[in-house]
């Protein structure tokens, strides 16, 4: 009788366990006042895992970034290879001038549109309600896809924060994008939206890696507390060898035979609860950058990396931009 009950129980939970191994959903903790950085992410993560966003969409935990990837063949091939290797998210922007090539590679891939997540960004020149609305619709056309999965405001630099955000809300309402978010926003920029009773961004994408973690911790904490997913850029130190060879990275990497500094840094990002978008134009590196789901960094290794200091000097830093609201009534 007991054996039968045990067998019945196993039969019930086996499919659940099997499904869990294949693809799990990572939910940013609801109560995050004390455990501000989600550390619950474990080796169970797979490249098919997703983050549950505050708007109900599910975003792949890893994707391909295409900043400084040349329009045309370079972008087309990188996206096609990435999709073949199992990437299901591409992060582009008007600024990168490669939206058309991204869209073509996706259309030619034969993978159903709904299986691929496409992020693009509204460039600084198009802030303001009418301008942002018009530009967003044009970008969907240029991508040659029916909709964008995530439309981000690239930075707060040119202001009109509330009315530009209203345009993104309208683009979502019209079905041109499924999720909306921001990039390079600091706490004060997001608070401007909250203060004007607008919905919260689903994502904030900003430079995030061990060397900027300490100074940006308050922003990370604010995002986690408000269920805004942190999307990290520059996770591999923009490929800069002098930083990839920093003693902290070298020591942690040495403890994981077969792993590389880039993989260790990407894994750090994942274990911090950040979505990562490593960029490469090389097939072997696209494959390498996906190889981050079969090892785990210890708490001590995470701390060692998080205590790194230094400046990458690779990017702009619009986090200090003034808060200019623009029109707050439609
Ligand atoms: N919102 C924003 O303002 C903003 C700003 C910057 C970036 N982003 C987004 O974030 C993405 C990622 O950031 P990122 O491209 O600046 O930097 P990254 O991903 O940290 O580094 C990319 C650099 O690392 C090299 N690389 C790739 N794989 C490597 C590996 N396994 N080992 C050593 N080097 C490797 C690449 O060269 P190869 O191509 O030659 O392999 C490239 O030079 C961007 O592509 C873009 O989509 C957004």
Image (cartoon, grey):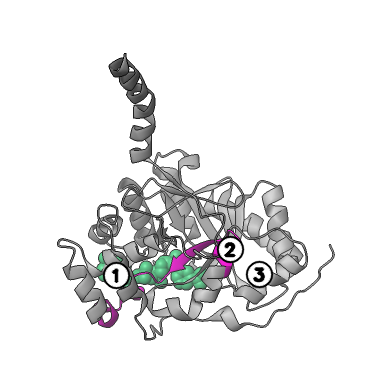
Residue 225 shows which numbered tag?
A: 2
The relative height of residue 188 versus residue 149 in the rendered view (above or below) is: below
Give how far apart the Cα atoms at labels 1 and 2 are.
Answer: 24 Å
Does the numbered disc 3 mark a residue whose Cβ is under 8 Å from ligand 1? no
Question: Which range is magenta?
Answer: 222-244
Task: Find out whether the residues at labels 1 and 2 contact each other: C-beta distance under 8 Å.
Answer: no
- Judged from the image, the secondary structure of the residue bearing numbered disc 3 is helix
**Residue 119 picture location, percent across and down:** 52, 57
Q: Where's residue 64, x and y in %?
A: 39, 58
- Nearer the viewer's eye, disc 3 or disc 1? 1
| Location of residue 285 (image quadrant) | bottom left
The residue located at (62%, 57%) in the rendering is 180
Q: Is mark 2 on a helix, strand or loop?
A: helix
Residue 291, horizontal then vertical, whole percent: 26, 55
Horizontally, residue 34 falls left or right of residue 156, namely: left
> Which of the marked residues, 1 or 2, is nearer the chain's N terminus?
2
Gap in Å between the C-alphas at discs 2 and 3?
13 Å
Image quarter hosting the N terminus: top left
Is residue 328 inside the magenta stretch? no
């Amino acid at each position: 009788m007991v054996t039968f009950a045990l067998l019945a129980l196993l039969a019930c939970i086996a499919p659940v366990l099997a499904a869990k191994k294949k693809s799990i959903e990572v939910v940013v903790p609801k109560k995050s006042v004390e455990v501000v950085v989600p550390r619950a992410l474990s080796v169970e993560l797979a490249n098919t895992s997703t983050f549950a966003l505050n708007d109900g969409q599910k975003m792949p935990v890893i994707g391909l970034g295409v900043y400084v990837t040349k329009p045309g063949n370079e972008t087309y091939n990188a996206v096609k290879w990435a999709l073949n290797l199992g990437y299901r998210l591409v992060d582009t922007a008007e600024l990168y001038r490669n939206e058309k090539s991204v869209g073509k590679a996706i259309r030619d891939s034969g993978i159903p549109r709904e299986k691929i997540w496409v992020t693009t960004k509204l460039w600084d020149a198009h802030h303001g309600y009418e301008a942002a609305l018009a530009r967003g619709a044009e970008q969907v056309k240029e991508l040659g896809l029916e909709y964008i999965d995530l439309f981000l405001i690239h930075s707060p630099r040119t202001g009109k924060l509330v009315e530009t955000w209203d345009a993104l809300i309208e683009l979502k309402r019209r079905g041109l994008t499924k999720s909306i978010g921001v990039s390079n926003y600091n706490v004060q920029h997001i608070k401007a939206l909250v203060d004007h009773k607008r919905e919260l961004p689903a994502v904030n994408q900003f430079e995030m890696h061990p060397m900027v973690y300490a100074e940006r911790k308050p922003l990370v904490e604010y995002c986690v507390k408000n269920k805004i997913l942190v999307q990290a850029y520059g996770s591999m130190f923009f490929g800069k060898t002098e930083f990839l060879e920093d003693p902290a990275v070298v020591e942690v990497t040495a403890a994981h035979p077969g792993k590389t500094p880039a993989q260790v840094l990407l894994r750090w990002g994942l274990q911090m609860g950040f979505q990562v978008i490593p960029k490469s134009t090389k097939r072997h590196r696209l494959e390498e950058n996906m190889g981050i789901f079969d090892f785990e960094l210890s708490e001590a290794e995470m701390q060692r990396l998080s205590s790194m200091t230094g400046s990458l000097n690779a990017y702009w830093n619009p986090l200090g931009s003034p808060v200019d609201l623009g029109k707050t009534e439609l």
